[in-house]
Amino acid sequence: MRSDPAHTDSPESAPEVIVLGVTASDAHAVANQLIAHQLRAHGYTVINLGVCTPVEEFALAVREHPGVLAVVIGSLNGHAYEDLCDLPAARAAGELACPVILGGNLSVGSRKDPEAPARLRRLGVDHVLTELADLDPLLRELARRAARSRRLQTI
């Protein structure tokens, strides 16, 4: 199990931390690095776990970095459902209480499974994205909700 993230950026102006990685059986690194770069450019602190990341490593990163805004998981090989089979247990144990976002290729082969997003949501994925352009607006909305929740807790 990797305890040190592949890349950690901690700009002082980026209070929102994102844990990023690629599903356990997926070794596609280029998209992961491009997403990490884009997130950093948008002001997020990125804990990039890299490729072939099992659910337990995402959970460990969230434990090591309290206040994580979201876990962002990519899948290009189409085996996300199988790779995230441990997600319900991690969620039940309270190990991944932050939003889990999944994007990329969600099914194997040229015919895409229209049921894949619903199956992944039932597994415990909060948001399934089909377009990378949707990631930043979603994260900004999650940050607004988190800030609102923190304000309400101080009242």
Image (tube, helix red, strand yellow):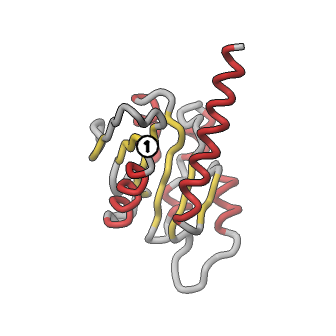
Q: Which residue is denoted by mark 1 in the rendering?
A: 44
Residue 23: image quadrant is bottom left
Residue drawn at point x = 32 percent, y = 63 percent: 29
| Image quadrant where one finds the N terminus | top left
Instruction: Indicate whether 24 appears above or below 61.
Output: below
Instruction: Indicate whether 119 appears above or below 87.
Output: below
Instruction: Indicate whether 64 appears above or below 50.
Output: above
Give whichever of 85, 37 is nearer the camera. Answer: 37
Q: Position of residue 75 (x, y in %)?
A: 47, 64
Residue drawn at point x = 27 percent, y = 46 percent: 6
The extreme bottom residue here reads 110
Other-residue count near label 1 (Cα within 10 Å), few / some / many at <14 / 14–19 / ≥20: many
Q: Amino acid at mark 1?
A: Tyr
Q: Is residue 142 left or right of residue 37?
A: right
Q: Position of residue 76 (x, y in %)?
A: 44, 69
Q: What element does badge 1 sit on?
A: loop
